[in-house]
Image (spheres, helix red, strand yellow):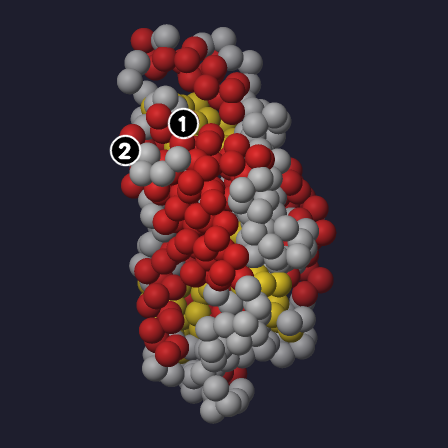
C-alpha cells in the first residue's frame, strides 16, 4: 500500500498535466449520473494493521442502522489493489460505493467517469493540507476527499549509531554508508543490513526511483511534462540504487521488498536504516511486536549532497459512479475526513492524515514525535505526475529500473530506454 502525502511547501510544486485527454478512453457518455440513494454501503479500502478503521465504522453503524458500512479490504500490493478496482469499474459494478484511491489514480478514475465530483461544501477544503487537497482534484474539481497523506522518511537505529559514535542520522548517501561501516564494527552490528526501501517490481519501486533521482538534483519529468531521465542528475539517482545493491549497502534480498517486507526487516533488527512511510512508526514502537521499540529515530531521507527529496503520496476517498447509494457514500466520506474523526483516528495510529491542524497539535506531536520531521520532509517532497496513463508510466519505470539494478542493463542503457518509453507514453494523442 502506497501510503503517503502533501505539504506546506509542496503546494507550490506543479503537478504534471500529462496527456489528460484521449489516452486510455473512458466509460463513455452512458456513465451514471449522481444520485441521492441511501442505504447500506461497501467501502473498498486497504488493509488496516492497526484495526482502527473497523472501530470507526462500528461507531458509524451504531448511529446509522439503515445505512451501515461494510469494509472490503483490497490487496496489500498497490498494483493489485488498483487492478481489482479497475476490473470492478470496467464492468460498472455496484459492489463498491466508496473507494480508497492512491493519490495518483484520481486523474485516471475521474477521466474515465468511474468516480463522481464531490459536491461543493461537502467537506471543509480549507482544513486540509493544501497539496493533499490538490491530489484529490481533476481539472479543477474535487473528486476525492484527502484522507491519508505524507512522504517517505528514514527510520534509523538510534541505539546502534550512538554506540558506534555516529552523531546523528545521515544527511547524504555517503554519510549513510560511513555510518553503516561504523555500526558493523560493533558486535551488535555484525550481519545487520545497512539500508533498504521498496524495490519489488511494483509502484513502490517507481516511488523509490523517483526519490533517488530527485535526491540527486534531477527530475523524472520537467514542468512541461517532458521526461528527463537521461540527465546527469537523473542517472546519478539511478546509479545510487545500482551501486548500493552491488556494494551491499542494500541487501540482495531487498530486491523483492515492498512496504511490509521492509518494515518487518527493520522491526526484527535486520537493518540500520529503512525508508518507509509514517505508518511504520506505531508498529515499530509496539513493545510486544518489535525488536527495536524505543531504539529508533526518524529523519528526512538523505540525498547525494544533502537532505533528499521524497515523493508525495496519499490515499483519498471517492464515490463510485456505479453506486446506488451515493448520498450515504458522500455522507460517510464527509464523516471520516472530518476534524473530529481525523483526530480520533490520529490518536490510534501513525498514518499521517490530511488535516493541517494535526501537524501543529501538541498532543499529536507528543504522541508522534516524527511529525515535525515529516512536515520538514514534505516541504522538500514532490508530487508524482498527474496522468491518465500513470499505470503504464509506472510500469515502464519498474521495467527499466529493475533491469539496471539486476545488472541486465547498464545505467546508461536503462536510462535511455526509459526515456524513449516515457516519451511515447506521454506524447499528446
- Comparing 62 with 32, the one in front is 32
Q: Quadrant of residue 337?
A: bottom right
Q: Position of residue 32 (x, y in %)?
A: 48, 89
How many numbered dots are placed on residues in this image?
2
For the C terminus, the image quarter is bottom right
Give the residue pinned by disc 2.
253
- Comparing 230 with 141, the one in front is 230
Q: Position of residue 407 (x, y in %)?
A: 32, 34
Q: Earlier in the sequence, mark 2 or mark 1?
A: 1
Q: Residue at x 50, y 49 (%)?
A: 419
Q: Answer whether residue 249 is visible to the viewer in this image.
A: yes
Which label is found at residue 111?
none
Element assignment for label 1 = helix
Q: Residue at x 61, y 57 (%)?
A: 225
Residue most extreme to the bottom: 30
Query: Viewed as shown, does residue 18 lie left or right of 277?
Result: right
Q: Answer whether residue 47 is visible to the viewer in this image.
A: no
Mark 2–mark 1 distance (CA, rounded to whole Å): 13 Å
Neighbour tally class for label 1: few under 14, some 14-19, many 20 plus, Cα within 10 Å:
many
Element assignment for label 2 = helix
Q: Residue at x 48, y 86 (%)?
A: 28
Q: Residue at x 34, y 66 (%)?
A: 83
Mark in front: 2 vs 1: 1
Give the residue pinned by disc 1.
244
Q: Position of residue 247 (x, y in %)?
A: 36, 22
Amino acid at each position: 500500500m502506497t501510503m503517503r502525502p502533501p505539504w506546506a511547501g509542496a503546494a507550490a510544486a506543479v503537478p504534471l498535466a500529462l496527456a489528460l485527454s484521449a489516452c486510455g478512453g473512458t466509460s463513455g457518455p452512458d456513465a451514471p449520473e449522481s444520485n441521492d440513494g441511501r442505504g447500506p454501503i461497501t467501502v473498498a479500502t486497504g488493509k488496516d494493521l492497526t484495526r482502527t478503521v473497523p472501530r470507526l465504522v462500528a461507531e458509524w453503524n451504531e448511529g446509522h442502522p439503515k445505512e451501515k458500512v461494510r469494509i472490503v479490504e483490497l490487496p496489500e500490493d498497490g498494483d493489485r489493489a488498483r487492478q481489482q478496482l479497475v476490473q470492478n469499474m470496467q464492468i460498472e459494478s455496484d459492489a463498491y460505493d466508496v473507494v480508497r484511491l492512491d493519490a495518483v489514480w484520481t486523474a485516471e478514475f475521474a477521466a474515465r467517469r468511474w468516480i463522481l465530483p464531490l459536491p461543493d461544501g461537502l467537506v471543509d477544503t480549507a482544513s486540509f493540507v493544501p497539496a493533499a487537497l490538490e491530489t484529490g482534484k481533476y481539472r479543477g474539481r474535487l473528486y476525492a476527499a484527502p484522507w491519508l497523506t505524507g512522504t517517505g522518511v528514514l527510520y534509523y537505529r538510534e541505539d546502534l549509531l550512538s554506540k558506534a559514535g555516529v552523531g546523528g542520522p545521515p544527511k547524504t548517501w555517503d554519510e549513510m554508508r560511513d555510518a553503516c561501516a561504523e555500526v558493523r564494527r560493533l558486535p551488535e552490528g555484525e550481519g545487520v543490513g545497512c539500508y533498504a526501501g521498496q524495490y519489488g517490481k511494483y509502484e513502490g519501486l517507481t516511488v523509490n526511483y523517483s526519490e533517488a533521482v530527485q535526491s540527486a538534483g534531477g527530475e523524472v519529468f520537467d514542468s512541461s511534462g517532458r521526461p528527463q531521465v537521461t540527465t546527469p542528475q537523473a542517472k546519478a539517482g539511478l546509479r545510487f540504487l545500482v551501486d548500493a545493491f552491488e556494494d551491499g549497502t542494500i541487501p540482495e534480498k531487498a530486491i523483492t521488498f515492498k512496504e511490509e517486507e521492509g518494515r518487518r526487516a527493520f522491526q526484527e533488527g535486520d537493518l540500520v536504516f529503512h525508508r518507509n512511510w509514517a505508518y511504520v512508526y506505531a508498529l515499530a514502537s509496539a513493545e510486544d511486536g518489535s525488536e527495536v521499540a524505543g531504539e529508533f529515530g526518524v529523519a528526512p531521507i538523505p540525498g547525494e549532497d544533502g537532505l533528499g527529496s521524497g515523493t508525495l503520496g496519499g490515499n483519498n476517498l471517492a464515490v463510485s459512479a456505479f453506486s446506488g447509494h451515493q448520498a450515504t457514500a458522500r455522507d460517510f466520506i464527509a464523516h471520516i475526513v472530518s476534524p473530529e474523526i481525523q483526530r480520533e483516528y490520529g490518536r490510534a495510529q501513525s498514518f499521517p492524515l490530511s488535516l493541517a491542524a494535526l501537524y501543529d497539535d501538541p498532543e499529536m506531536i507528543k504522541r508522534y514525535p516524527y511529525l515535525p520531521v515529516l512536515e520538514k520532509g514534505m516541504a522538500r517532497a514532490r508530487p508524482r505526475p498527474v496522468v491518465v496513463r500513470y499505470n503504464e508510466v509506472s510500469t515502464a519505470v519498474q521495467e527499466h529500473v529493475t533491469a539496471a539494478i539486476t545488472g541486465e542493463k547498464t545505467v546508461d542503457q536503462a536510462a535511455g530506454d526509459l526515456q524513449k518509453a516515457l516519451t511515447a507514453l506521454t506524447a499528446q494523442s
